[in-house]
Image (spheres, rainbow, N blue to C red):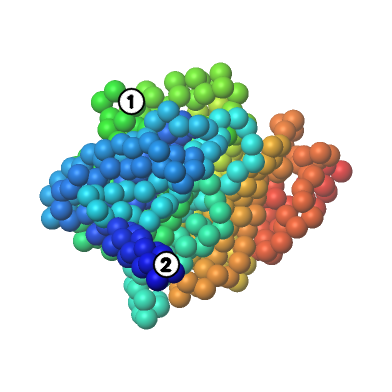
């Protein structure tokens, strides 16, 4: 009898916990991570109705602290929720659960940014704006879905995008199909990401911008989804330029930002801007950016610029700045002609990239930041989402440290696998050809 009673108590407890935890909240967009900092993070999600939702969180699963979420009406039959957590510990994993009355989400985690320099990695992609245009009919949302999953599963700490995240960032259905159901879902649930907005989300009121929380909100006259901004992560400075405020920001804000970042002595500086200064397929880049942005990059020692806009992969190196176009986020620019052959753009574009014509390949870039170097690798995918592998590598070890135009001595030291997967014609052209540079040095 005693045993039977004990069992019924256990069953009752199990039943109560089943009732309490069996139904997750009715997400339209499940919680995703934004604006991670050493002492804070923003968590966002979308639900059809307006509800009182609160978060419980802490560094262990006791979830001792709590906070109420704020919500705004998306005006598309849903509500966008946001919780900004502050006063967190740097470089720390937190557990959290979202609740409404007797409904509770399962326990999720996030990790705050490290305060001090340490190794970490980030992903970069661009132009995940649409479907694959029938190249893989079985699932038109590939390979973007697989690329986002791959990036998240590879364990990057943060991700950045050079923009164009929906064909029409002002159209809710486009934002649903291309952004919320792919980027927020497969990447953002575990990886905080930062957008440098593109020309397909040009307006301040575009719905896609309401789904972001960026450090631009700290600038006078800007808001969480509007304007260029910068932030530091583990001693590295990141700058995201908004296509829509680009000219004013570059003329007035950027130089101040670069100057003031120098006082923090950043290990590296990476800049993200939708339209590339230099390009070979479809356009030759942007003349205004070449005259106004490039001198600042060179003067203030920006290490690399990541762009999109053209839907392909290109890469070059000029005056100590790496230029990368990583526009292979969804459909590719098969129809576009080569319009320019810049001498310093030596991968993709006017050259074939490995087995791919020009730079026409679906891809994203991963950057591993170590204590004394950074290494970029381009990860290529088939239209159906199958992973092809790394097809380009680049990084800080190829910098011309003494400015003599040659990669000699310690400047040429690189990991033995550095050129693995490098396209054969890239080995023959430009600064990433150690053989050629050695010959020149002799
Ligand atoms: Fe685009």
Q: How many marks?
A: 2
Percent across and percent down for residue 62 are: 44, 43
Kindly tell me whether residue 251 is visible in this rendering. no
Outermost residue, bottom side: 138
Where is residue 143 drawn, in percent x and y? 44, 69
Q: Is 418 in front, or is 299? A: 418
Q: Residues within 10 Å of mark 1 (few under 14, many from 20)?
A: some
Residue 229 point in image, percent of width and height:
39, 32
- Between the C-alphas of marks 2 and 1, the distance is 67 Å
Q: Which mark is residue 2?
A: 2
When the figure is inspected, residue 219 is found, relative to residue 412, above or below; the finding is above
Tag of residue 219: 1
Work out whether residue 60 or residue 194 is closer to the camera in this orientation and state it.
60
Q: Secondary structure at mark 1?
A: loop
Q: Residue at x 24, y 59 (%)?
A: 26
Q: Residue at x 40, y 76 (%)?
A: 135
Callout 2 crowding tier (Cα within 10 Å): few <14, some 14–19, many ≥20: few
Residue placed at 46% from the left, 67% from the top? 146
Whether residue 119 is situated above or below residue 38 in the rendered picture: below
Residue 415 horizontal side relative to residue 59, left or right: right
159 or 34: which is nearer to us?
A: 34
Q: Locate residue 82: give its quadrant.
A: top left
Q: For residue 68, which quarter of the picture?
A: top left
- Compared with residue 108, is residue 89 higher up or lower down, i.e. above or below? above
């Amino acid at each position: 009898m005693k045993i039977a009673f004990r069992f019924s108590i256990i069953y009752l407890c199990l039943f109560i916990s089943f009732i309490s935890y069996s139904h997750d909240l009715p997400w339209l967009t499940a919680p995703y991570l934004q604006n991670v900092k050493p002492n804070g993070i923003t968590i966002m999600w979308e639900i059809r109705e307006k509800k009182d939702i609160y978060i419980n969180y802490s560094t262990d699963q006791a979830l001792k602290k709590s906070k109420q979420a704020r919500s705004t009406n998306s005006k598309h039959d849903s509500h966008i929720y946001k919780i900004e957590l502050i006063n967190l510990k740097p470089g720390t994993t937190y557990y959290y659960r979202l609740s409404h009355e007797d409904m509770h989400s399962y326990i999720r985690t996030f990790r705050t940014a490290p305060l001090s320099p340490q190794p970490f990695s980030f992903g970069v992609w661009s132009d995940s704006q649409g479907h694959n245009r029938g190249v893989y009919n079985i699932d038109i949302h590939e390979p973007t879905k697989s690329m986002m999953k791959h990036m998240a599963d590879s364990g990057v700490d943060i991700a950045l995008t050079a923009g164009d995240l929906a064909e029409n960032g002002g159209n809710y259905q486009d934002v649903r199909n291309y952004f919320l159901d792919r980027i927020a879902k497969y990447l953002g649930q575990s990886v905080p990401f930062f957008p440098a907005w593109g020309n397909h989300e040009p307006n301040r009121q575009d719905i896609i911008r309401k789904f972001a929380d960026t450090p631009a909100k700290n600038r006078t006259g800007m808001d969480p989804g509007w304007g260029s901004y910068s932030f530091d992560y583990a001693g590295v400075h990141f700058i995201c330029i908004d296509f829509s405020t680009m000219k004013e920001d570059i003329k007035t804000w950027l130089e101040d930002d670069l100057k003031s970042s120098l006082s923090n002595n950043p290990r590296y500086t990476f800049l993200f801007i939708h339209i590339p200064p230099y390009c070979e397929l479809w356009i030759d880049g942007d003349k205004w950016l070449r005259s106004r942005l490039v001198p600042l990059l060179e003067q203030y020692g920006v290490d690399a610029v990541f762009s999109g806009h053209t839907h392909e992969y290109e890469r070059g190196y000029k005056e100590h700045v790496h230029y990368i176009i990583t526009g292979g986020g969804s459909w590719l620019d098969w129809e576009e002609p080569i319009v320019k052959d810049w001498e310093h753009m030596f991968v993709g574009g006017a050259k074939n990239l490995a087995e791919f014509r020009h730079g026409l390949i679906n891809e994203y870039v991963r950057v591993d930041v170590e204590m004394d170097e950074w290494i970029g690798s381009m990860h290529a995918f088939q239209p159906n989402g199958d992973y092809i592998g790394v097809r380009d590598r680049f990084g800080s070890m190829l910098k011309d440290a003494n400015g003599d135009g040659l990669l000699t001595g310690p400047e040429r030291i690189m990991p033995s696998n550095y050129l693995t997967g490098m396209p054969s014609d890239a080995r023959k052209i430009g600064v990433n050809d150690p053989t050629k540079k050695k010959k020149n040095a002799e």
